[in-house]
Image: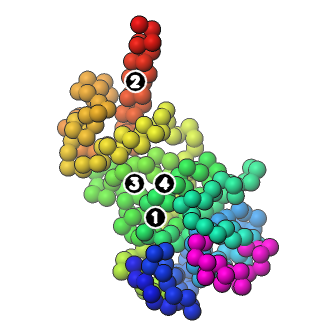
Amino acid sequence: MNGGARAGGHVARRRFGQNFLADPNIVANIVAAIRPQAGETMVEIGPGLGALTAPLLERLGHLHVVEIDRDLIARLRGHYDATRLTIHEGDALRFDFGVLAGEGALLRVVGNLPYNISTPLLFHLAGFAARICDLTFMLQKEVVLRMVAAPGTPEYGRLSVMLQYRFRMEKLFDVPPGAFRPAPKVTSSIVRMAPLPAEECRARDEALFGRVVAAAFGQRRKTLRNTLRDFFAEADFAALGLDPGLRAERLAVADFVAIANHCGARVQTSSSSTTGA
């Protein structure tokens, strides 16, 4: 990303991945897509110069923001009443989003996510899915295409599976580089993520599920027989009716869940047999 360029009197910092939205038409389209309603609990990640912050506040009455840049925090405090804008200073990768969701009120999360931390931040937010109503983000277009990709496509990978396991995803529209100051070198896209009901997330051991997915996509050109050799034998593939000669991108999310559950059940059975011996 470009660094050192001045936007709205603020020098964009490369280490924070700062590119500030400046096109009022794009801002209006994003706010319309979010559809903020008075009384909702919403948090904006990386408010920057406040392009989204101001119109969101107009509709909500109160907004939480998470910002790491102290200069931008000082700017926000100078522009907005603390009773309407609650500023949480710190790294969004370490922020506990669960504390913002009140009793019976799910949290809405929005933002122009820093592209340099987008993937780990998405995984971090997935851990709070049970407390979230929806998430609407602007990200690098290539990342969004990976998030919403279908099995069998070049973009389908670990990010696709891990997020689609927990969220229903929809790419909304693209945002050109010229909408930002400074302009990035890539096109951005808006994506909406809605957590799936808990009963649809069927992995019995989600940590094991994550390890299976990571291993399967660790060497994309190799077949499942090779990438999952630490998890599966030929008989295990046969038990699930899966072809070990396939590559990971050919499997649906449900297939990875079935693999992880089969592994977990086999380990549990083995442990029980050992204990009873």
Q: Is 262 left, or right, of 121 in this rendering? A: left
Residue type of the residue flagged with mark 2: Val
Residue placed under numbered mark 1 in the picture: 118
Residue 14: x and y in percent read: 44, 79
Q: Classify mark 2: helix, strand or loop.
A: helix
Neighbours of disc 2 within 10 Å: few (<14), some (14-19), many (20+): few
Q: Is residue 73 above or below residue 240?
A: below
Q: Is residue 156 visible?
A: yes
Mark 1 touching mark 4, by CB under 8 A?
A: no
Q: Nearer the viewer, mark 4 or mark 3?
A: 4
- Region in magenta: 67-85
Asked if the magenta segment contains residue 190, the reply would be no
Mark 2 touching mark 4, by CB under 8 A?
A: no
Residue 69: x and y in percent read: 58, 76
Residue placed under numbered mark 3 in the picture: 159
Residue type of the residue flagged with mark 4: Phe
Mark 2 touching mark 3, by CB under 8 A?
A: no
Residue placed under numbered mark 4 in the picture: 123
Q: Please tell me which of labels 1 and 4 falls first in the chain.
A: 1
